[in-house]
Image (cartoon, helix red, strand yellow):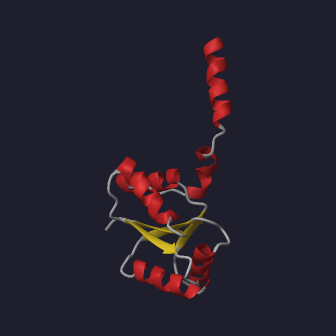
Amino acid sequence: MSKHLVLVSHGQFCEGLKQSTEMIMGPQDNIHTVALLPAEGPEEFQAKFLDTIEGLDDFVVFADLLGGTPCNVVSKLILEGRAIELYAGMNMPMVIRFINDALLGTSSYYHESTSEYVQYVNDVLNSMSDDEDE
């Protein structure tokens, strides 16, 4: 069985991220979402999370925000002894990298390359313009 990815977030960010990623990479049956809705607290979110991971043997969790309720709930489960791989600060390049790893049978430490995902486009364009002038 292939590795699964569980996206957790405040509101429907995780669901939108999955949908947007699927526009690029196609349908992803091994990606699951758990959204913390405004009327819910940590207990309700934890119940939804545990329900989602039930039966998943091999999975990684991407959370939207370090220190936010979704990340804190999963962190608490880790501190209680659950073997969960958790990354905070999720974005689309991380999800695409996860998909590529699954396709290629490779594994990544997603935090090691996240800085390359953020670029100041003005500098990139200026660099391109400078290269053309030479």
Left or right of 21 on screen, residue 122: right
Residue 24 in picture, x, y percent from top left: 39, 47
Residue plotted at (63% across, 66% down):
65
Residue 116, by quadrant, is top right
Does 103 sit left or right of 84 as displayed? left
Residue 81 visible in image: yes
Relative horizontal placement of residue 119, taking residue 3 as reference (left or right):
right
Q: 17 or 116, which lies in front?
A: 17
Q: Residue at x 52, y 86 (%)?
A: 44
Residue 101 visible to an observer of this rendering: no
Q: Residue at x 43, y 59 (%)?
A: 18
Question: Where 35 falls versus 77 (above or below)?
Answer: above
Residue 61 vertical position relative to residue 114 in the rendered view, above or below = below
Picture quadrant of residue 132: top right
Q: Position of residue 38 (x, y in %)?
A: 56, 77
Residue at 55%, 88% in the rendered image = 43
Quadrant the N terminus occupies: bottom left
Q: Is residue 87 above or below residue 54?
A: above
Residue 98: horizontal and vertical position, in percent?
A: 45, 56
